[in-house]
Image (cartoon, rainbow, N blue to C red):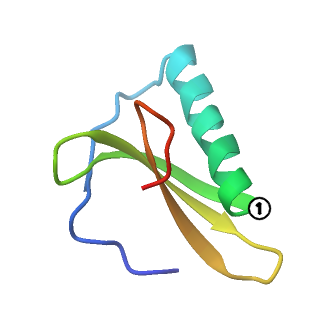
Amino acid sequence: VAPRPHHHRPVPASPSLPTASVAVSRGAAELAQRKAPGRVLKVERGLHVDNSVIWRIQVLTAAGEVRLVILDAETGRVR
């Protein structure tokens, strides 16, 4: 697993995610799989250094590599 970059901070999650939040994280995972096809290992919401909300998605590729895809939560664009 790649070391965690120091410029992203996790956003505290509520004890139970509302259904909409679960749906959004699934959408982020689907977008990440388009960039790095494979099995999603982890989806985490966080803050970028500019305080914008991002999604950090770890994907295990068919080659056995763990790829980290960072998406802008507002636009869905890869950072």
Classify mark 1: residues with Cα within 10 Å, few (<14), some (14-19) or many (20+).
Answer: some
In x, y percent, where is residue 8?
26, 58
User: Along the line of sight, which residue is nearer the eye, 23 or 69?
Assistant: 69
* 46 sits to left or right of 26: left
Indicate the amino acid at tag 1: Pro
> Residue at position x 75%, y 72% from top?
61
Q: Position of residue 64 (x, y in %)?
A: 75, 82
Vertical placement of residue 22 versus 2, above or below = above
Q: Residue at x 62, y 76 (%)?
A: 66
Q: Among all residues in the image, which is located at the extreme right? A: 62
Q: Is residue 18 left or right of residue 52?
A: right
| Residue found 80% across the figure and 83% down from its top | 63
Instruction: Identify the residue at image location x=70%, y=70%.
Output: 60
Callout 1 secondary element: loop
Residue found at the far top of this picture: 19
Placement of 10 over or under 16, stated as above or below: below
Q: Quadrant of residue 23?
A: top right
Q: Using residue 54 as the reference point, say whether residue 58 is left or right of it.
A: right
Q: Is residue 51 above or below residue 70?
A: above
Which residue lies under the disc numbered 1?
A: 37
The residue most toward the left is 50
Q: Is residue 15 left or right of residue 49?
A: right
In the rendered image, which quarter is residue 27 located in?
A: top right
Please state, as top left, top right, bottom left or bottom right, where the C terminus lies in the image.
bottom left
Residue 18, horizontal then vertical, whole percent: 49, 17
